[in-house]
Image (cartoon, rainbow, N blue to C red):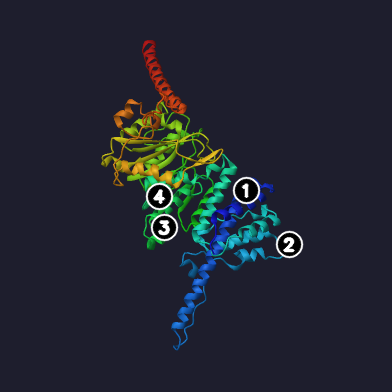
Amino acid sequence: MSTNIKDLENRLWEAADHMRANSPLRLNEFAEPVLGLIFLKFAGVKYNKTEKEIERERKTKAKSYAGASVVRERPVSSADYHAQGTLFVSKKARFLYLIELPEGTDMGRAVNDAMKEIEAENKELAGILPKTFQKLDNRSIIALLKNFNQIPDDIEGDAFGRIYEYFLGKFALADGSRGGEFFTPTSIVKLIVEIIEPYQGRIYDPACGSGGMFVQSHEFVKRHLENGQKTRASRKIAIYGQEKTDQTVRIAKMNLAIHGLSGDIREGNTYYEDRHKSLGKFDFTMANPPFNVKGIDKERIKDDPRFSYGIPRADNGNYLWIQIFLNSLNDKGRAGFVMANSASDAGHSEKEIRQKMIEDGVVDVIVAVGPNMFYNVTLPVTLWFLDRGKKKTDRKNKILFIDARNIYRQIDRAHRDWTDKQIEQIASIVRSYRSENGKKYKDVKGFCKVATIDEVKKAGYSLNPGRYVGVTDNGNGDDGNFGEKIEKLHGELKGLTDEAHELENKIFENLKKITY
């Protein structure tokens, strides 16, 4: 049966969203059980497929024994399903069983029990599945079960992953600022993955949210394997993540499982807890951390080796995150992450850290992203790409700047994304710069520029692409880009402010000498 996944996604969401609108639960309270039911349906469908395969295998084996002495077969057990990468789903945890329960059944308890049974039979899911269904009334649970039972049993395996990610995105969009804490838009993640190219190795996300970076890394590996080897993609990468809240850890683990992946996802506050002992450990690090976090206790982190460039004096967590990402890499590792625009030109101690990183040759590519690409951030952002292996290449004294602010697809009035073609356009520029695709790299005015470290030094160690790529001449003497002019003026003002602070410090030092 051929299923139009897009139409199905829309129908499923519209029905679930209608129920949410009529529910007393807050969005985050409603989201987890809904995602749990998608997972339950996925587990049941995969179980049914595997059950048929096991039956076929046993019938084939029985025919081969025809005329020979009878061989007594042991009963089918959960181990037979696990051997085929399938979760074991007992009768009371199956969708149809739950839907057909008699009227008056406590449906909240029944679904909670179903989740417990799946966890009991599949130890890797222990403590992960939601058991908050008694917060929903019977009518809502039955309606949700019937809604998700629309998903046909012969649907392709990857489709469940798409539906789960679709719902994650919709919940993030509906939840605005809170939603962005656990979900990064797929097109942003795809570009990060295409640029750092995680063909195989250890992948780390210390602010992993719902695990989208891991899912897209797996998709990247699958795209680059021959058809017969695609099923082995999950063996090429090892997944390590950390997240601050238990609820988000559970959502991430369900997301991985529904995509046929497993990983070591741990709960912990990354500023203070390095749960994976990450120093120099990973081949790839990807993240979309919270921006401009204030109130971090610097006394608790002052001796942490992850902050090798120093603790910034500013009450802002951006340059702590940047150091966490860099110092998690091994000597050939690459990192790609989302960062607030302000970090590109931040002054004082943050500038000192940025200067050291630039001079150490670990900053590889910087991409400016336009506004409205995120659910929780309307402002433009910047993508940073670091590469510890770059120092042994001809790029060691260079940085590629890309201004992608004018590349986007308008989804609706308030939201944008990138098409696959646009992602490839940006990624191919990076591959040319790295001499990976056989194409000769060329600067394109207004879009991309390879700057030397000396040029970056002259620009005050700014990592703002607008300072380097220039503007396209539209023939009337006006570049038509008001934002570009503002950024340039902002950069100049930053430089003057830094100079003023330096003069203040000198005057203060001189006054101390006179006084004492």
- What is the crowding at mark 2: few (fewer than 14 residues within 10 Å), some, or many (at least 20)? few
Q: Amino acid at mark 3?
A: Ser
Q: Estimate the spatial distance between the alpha carbons at disc 1 and disc 4, rounded to whole Å.
A: 30 Å
Q: Estimate the spatial distance between the alpha carbons at disc 3 and disc 1, rounded to whole Å.
A: 31 Å
Q: Nearer the viewer, residue 36 or 375?
A: 375
Q: Is residue 208 visible?
A: no
Residue 29 tag number: 1
Q: Secondary structure at mark 1?
A: helix
- Answer left or right for 509 relative to 171: left
Residue most extreme to the top: 514
Q: Earlier in the sequence, mark 3 or mark 1?
A: 1
Q: Amino acid at mark 1?
A: Glu
User: Residue tagged by mark 4?
Assistant: 203
Above or below: residue 334 compared with residue 200: above
- Picture residue at 50% right of the left edge, 44% below the top: 185
User: Residue tagged by mark 2?
Assistant: 104
Q: Secondary structure at mark 4?
A: strand
Query: Do callouts 2 and 1 mark residues in contact (Cβ within 8 Å)?
Result: no
User: Residue tagged by mark 3?
Assistant: 234
